[in-house]
Image: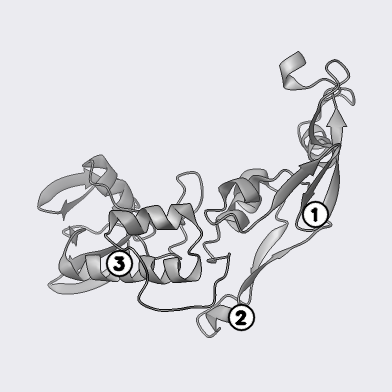
């Protein structure tokens, strides 16, 4: 076990736990945007920035992917942490002013409008869509291109492999800025500019899921060929 102090409170957590997990054990809320409990931490948005003191040296880090250390002191609401966090949210708001998730974070921090003007973009490179596709869906149809320390942020983008995509829409559902568009019309679903045929229930006649997605699940789970002929509501 590792013992540390967060906002003046001692806490013990298992070795390998993150600061965010340790804070949660103390019911100390740290805001997040690119974090999801079922995905590998990414630390891209910087919204969860905290101040840490180790061996007398203070620094800023992201709580979602920083492992705890014995004797570490964490300050979640120090002036340095709050300033860094507010700057991150302000820049995100300037980039994606239409995102309700970002506007909500900004309101909580007392930010009404950003002081800077940036070219409005829908994608904030949080990586949620990529990690969801890789880790939860298991398809790996999305990837971040040109991401690295020596790359300019504007060069980085999410690339979709339409050959791998099964049209499940998980990326669109988890996207915090609604950058990824999913549209359904009649018996088709469109995502990443690819049109997917929807499966029709043999009982109620409703179209309920992409055929490509259901076929992927059927093969992965070794299910009978007629397993998805009926929708979940009619089973």
Q: Nearer the viewer, mark 1 or mark 2?
A: 2
**Would residue 116 be visible to someone looking at this image?**
yes
Q: Quadrant location of the C terminus?
A: top right
- Farthest-out residue, left: 8
Residue 97 percent across, percent down from the top left: 48, 64
Q: Separation of disc 2 and disc 3 at Cα?
A: 25 Å
Of 93 and 131, which appears nearest the observer? Answer: 93
The answer to whether 61 is drawn above or below residue 179 in the figure is below
Q: Residues within 10 Å of mark 3 (few under 14, many from 20)?
A: some
Seen at 29% across and 52% down, the residue is 30
| Secondary structure category for the residue under label 3 | helix
Task: Give the mark nearest the N terminus, 1 or 2.
Answer: 2
Q: Which mark is residue 147?
A: none
Q: Residues within 10 Å of mark 2 (few under 14, many from 20)?
A: few
Task: Give the mark nearest the N terminus, 3 or 1.
Answer: 3
| Secondary structure category for the residue under label 1 | loop
Q: What coloring was used for the rendering?
A: one colour
Q: Separation of disc 1 and disc 2 at Cα?
A: 23 Å
Tag 2 and tag 3, C-beta contact below 8 Å: no
Q: Which mark is residue 155?
A: 2
- Residue 58 as seen in the image, left or right of residue 235: left
Q: Nearer the viewer, mark 2 or mark 3?
A: 3
Tag 3 and tag 1, C-beta contact below 8 Å: no
| Secondary structure category for the residue under label 2 | helix
Q: Which mark is residue 164?
A: 1
The answer to whether 45 is drawn above or below residue 15 in the figure is below
The residue identified by callout 3 is: 86
Seen at 77% across and 35% down, the residue is 217
Seen at 69% across and 45% down, the residue is 169
Task: Give the mark nearest the N terminus, 2 or 3.
Answer: 3
Q: Residues within 10 Å of mark 1 (few under 14, many from 20)?
A: few
């Amino acid at each position: 076990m590792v013992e540390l102090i967060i906002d003046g409170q001692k806490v013990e957590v298992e070795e390998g736990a993150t600061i965010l997990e340790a804070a949660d054990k103390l019911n100390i809320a740290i805001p997040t945007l690119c974090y999801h409990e079922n995905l590998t931490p990414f630390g891209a948005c910087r919204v969860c920035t905290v101040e840490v003191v180790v061996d007398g040296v203070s620094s800023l880090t992201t709580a979602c992917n920083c492992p705890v250390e014995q004797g570490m002191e964490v300050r979640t609401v120090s002036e340095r942490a709050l300033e860094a966090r507010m700057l991150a949210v302000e820049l995100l708001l300037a980039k994606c002013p239409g995102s309700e998730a970002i506007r909500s974070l900004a309101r909580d921090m007392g930010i009404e409008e950003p002081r800077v003007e940036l070219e409005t973009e829908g994608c904030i490179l949080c990586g949620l869509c990529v990690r969801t596709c890789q880790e939860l869906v298991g398809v790996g149809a999305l990837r971040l291109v040109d991401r690295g320390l020596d790359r300019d942020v504007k060069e980085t983008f999410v690339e979709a492999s339409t050959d791998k995509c099964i049209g499940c829409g998980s990326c669109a559902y988890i996207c915090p800025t609604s950058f990824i568009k999913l549209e359904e019309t009649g018996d088709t679903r469109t995502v990443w500019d690819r049109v997917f045929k929807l499966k029709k229930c043999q009982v109620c006649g409703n179209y309920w899921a992409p055929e490509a997605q259901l076929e992927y699940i059927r093969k992965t789970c070794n299910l009978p060929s007629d397993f998805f002929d009926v929708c979940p509501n009619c089973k």
